Amino acid sequence: MSSIENMRYPEPRYQGAEGEVNASFRPADTPPEVSSPGGSTSYLATQESTGGEFGLYKGVLGPNSAGAKTHFHRAMSESFYILSGELELFNGEKWVTGREGDFLYVPVGGLHAFKNVTDAPISMLMLFSPGSPREEYFEQVAEMSRRGPEELKEFRIRHDSYFVEDFDFGNANANGNGSENGNGNGNGRPE
């Protein structure tokens, strides 16, 4: 038997006979929900709009934006698809350069980080599965980073984001760099 013969779809969740009119459309010119001098985030599909199946967001990072330092998620996977520009991605072991069309999948628990070290903006899709309420995280992380390390740590944990710098994991591979608040030092070592 080939793997195709063993492939199975999940159990049906829709029990109707004729289908429904329930698709949603978001025009390309819809303004992003979160904007800052360093970039923007557009909510393409949220946990709420997908019934918890996934969350899909378009992120734009301005030139030399520090992104996010090394972290992992306990409840969701995260994937990155580069739409334009170049993004440095930490895959838990080393930094790789993601370019247009490149994809990075980070399973639940996988260490990862990202940053833009170029003089040009980048755009990417970020997919979280299952869907999680990431909107508050995107909307408030910059403010929380100004409130001090303990409040920021509590905020991150509440949003299933476990940053290596917040804990003593003793992980030699956790050397990714970036910063949600734009203060990354760019040298690959924690600040």
Image: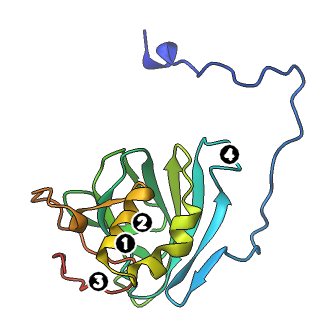
Q: Nearer the viewer, residue 166 or 99?
A: 166
Q: Amino acid at mark 2?
A: Phe
Q: Does dot 3 land on a helix, a strand or a loop?
A: loop
Q: Nearer the viewer, mark 4 or mark 2?
A: 2
Residues at marks 1 and 2 touching, judged by CB atoms closer than 8 Å: yes
Amino acid residing under circle 4: Thr
Residue 8 horizontal/vertical position (percent):
54, 18
Q: Please name the residue that numbered disc 4 is placed on.
A: 50
In whole angstroms, how far apart are the C-alphas of marks 1 and 3?
16 Å
Tell me the mark number nearer the camera, choosing from 1 and 3: 1
Q: Residue 124, can we see it?
A: no
Crowd tier of the residue under label 1, counting other residues whose Cα lies within 10 Å: few below 14, some 14–19, many 20 or above = some
Instruction: Please state, as top left, top right, bottom left or bottom right, where the N terminus lies in the image.
Output: top left
Amino acid carrying mark 1 in the image: Leu
Quadrant of the image containing the C terminus: bottom left
Q: Which residue is mark 1?
A: 152
Which of labels 1 and 4 is toward the front?
1
Q: Which of the marked residues, 2 or 3, is nearer the chain's N terminus?
A: 2
Label whose residue precedes the other's in the sequence (4 or 2): 4
- Which residue, given by chain and number where applicable, does mark 3 sit on? 184
The image position of residue 127, as x and y in percent, is 52, 54
Q: Position of residue 142 (x, y in %)?
A: 46, 80
- Label for residue 155? 2
